[in-house]
Amino acid sequence: MRKNRRRLIFENVAVMDAGAKGKTVGKAPDGRIVFLDNAVPGDVVDVQTHKKRKSYFEGTAVAFHSLSEKRVEPECEHFGVCGGCKWQNMGYDHQLYYKQKEVENNLKRIGHLDLPEIQSILGSKDIYFYRNKMEFSFSDSRWLTMDEIQSNKDIDNKNALGFHIPGMWDKILDIKKCHLQRDPSNAIRLETKKFAQENDLTFFNPRNQHGLLRTLMIRTASTGELMVLIQFFEENKPQIELLLNHLKETFPDITSLLYVVNTKQNDTIYDQEVICFAGRDHIFEEMEGLSFKITAKSFYQTNSEQAYELYKVTRDFAMLTGNELVYDLYTGTGTIAQFVAKKAKKVIGIESVPDAILDAKANAERNNINNVAFFVGDMKNVFNDSFIAQHGKPDVIITDPPRDGMHKDVVQQILNISPQRIVYVSCNSATQARDLELMKDRYEVVKVQPVDMFPQTHHVENVVLLKKKN
């Protein structure tokens, strides 16, 4: 071990495991954990640290003495810089192993739960080109590679259309080909950039807040429909129409061509007017005969095929006979509520986003589902005693909260209601485990089913069935 400009170098570190947030794990000579951002379990590496804490280090592998048998060659030329698919250098079977292990560890170590045998994780059939929604950012000051910097050449064109470099809000990596969304996603992005440069349309500068082109969103659906939304920073109608007309003519398969003029400092469009330039202002997604209207602001699971698998697990865990009153907490656009409705007496959905509830009601009407009702409001405020008195005590609660999990008041209200079964769907097994610990005196964990929605990343969904103890 030697010091290097106040940073440490640890030599011949065996990478033992994969940890949280996609990092891998080794041990420093003093026994402290070292979290790495560019190694695979089984590698033996030299590590240069860049952060030191009381109980751990964070670092980067700077030399590889031996490579793990778990390694594979990354598909994407941008791997290692982009940061979007951190596990692309690890075989998919091994990705699934570590995702399942993370779920089990979180439930045991954070939730201190007595667990049944956890069912094997459901892997994704498609491990590339599986996302139905991608968002790209424009920049006039793109991220330069180390080769470009060291060449000392003047680089005139620094325009980019791609992804933010991790931890750098104002630097965009120009993407040549992304392996996350199927065509024509790459073709649309590349043509948009090419046409913009040929016609002197300015790219956004986030630091100085100027430039016309801000973001590009592309949504594809299993129905074959296609949505494209461009966000502009400036109200320049001739240039806006020039670009949109070109996309309309070049890609006639675009179902919904939209734009936003957003002069705010942030890119969020939820408080912005979305203008339909051509086609419809929405596309349709389908699942098991159900049709879901997707607008620019709609939430829909970004892996359509795996969303179907996730919802089937959720419905199976609920064990519905047709006689149950079901509450679907954090219902979003009501996809789970409508998916389980045919096996329930009635489903009540609650969600805090008004536009999502409007979508949920419209989708239920389109699907001729009459035994669902949707309500809007902050969960911890709406989900109260008077709401239960008005709508009935549920036999089953399905809850699919955001990454932060459920508010403790919501957990307490669930305990007060004391339904027979709870199905907890989570995209963060750590906060799920925290919430489950609060319920473990009254409920037992009967089933656990991890589902991989995001191959090449560390993210994993998990479904838990709870039954009330006798």
Image: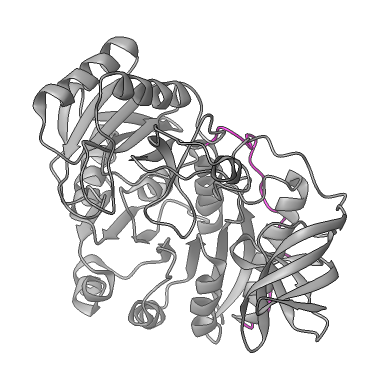
In depth, the one of 438 and 38 nearer the eye is 38
Residue 435 in view here? yes
In depth, the one of 414 and 470 nearer the eye is 414
Residue 116 in view here? no
Please indicate whether residue 118 sits to the left or right of residue 82 in the image.
right
Is the stretch drawn in magenta largely helix, strand or loop?
loop
Q: Which residue is rendered at x = 53% and y = 56% of the image?
A: 319
Q: Position of residue 199 (x, y in %)?
A: 26, 19
Please indicate whether residue 237 sits to the left or right of residue 295 in the image.
left
Q: Which residue is rendered at x = 58% and y = 47% of the image?
A: 81
Q: Position of residue 99 (x, y in %)?
A: 67, 58
Above-or-below relation of 391 to 54: above
Q: Which residue is rendered at x = 57% and y = 33% of the image?
A: 179
Quarter the C terminus occupies: bottom right
Residue 155 sits inside the magenta stretch: no
Q: Position of residue 291 (x, y in %)?
A: 34, 32
Count of numbered marks: 0
Above-or-below relation of 230 to 354: above
Quarter the N terminus occupies: bottom right
Q: How does the figure colour the protein chain or chains? A: one colour
In depth, the one of 234 and 132 nearer the eye is 234
In depth, the one of 99 and 271 nearer the eye is 271
Q: Position of residue 26 (x, y in %)?
A: 78, 71
Which residues lie in the magenta part?
Answer: 112-130
Above-or-below relation of 376 to 27: above
Residue 122 sits inside the magenta stretch: yes
Which of the 4 image quadrants contains residue 375? bottom left
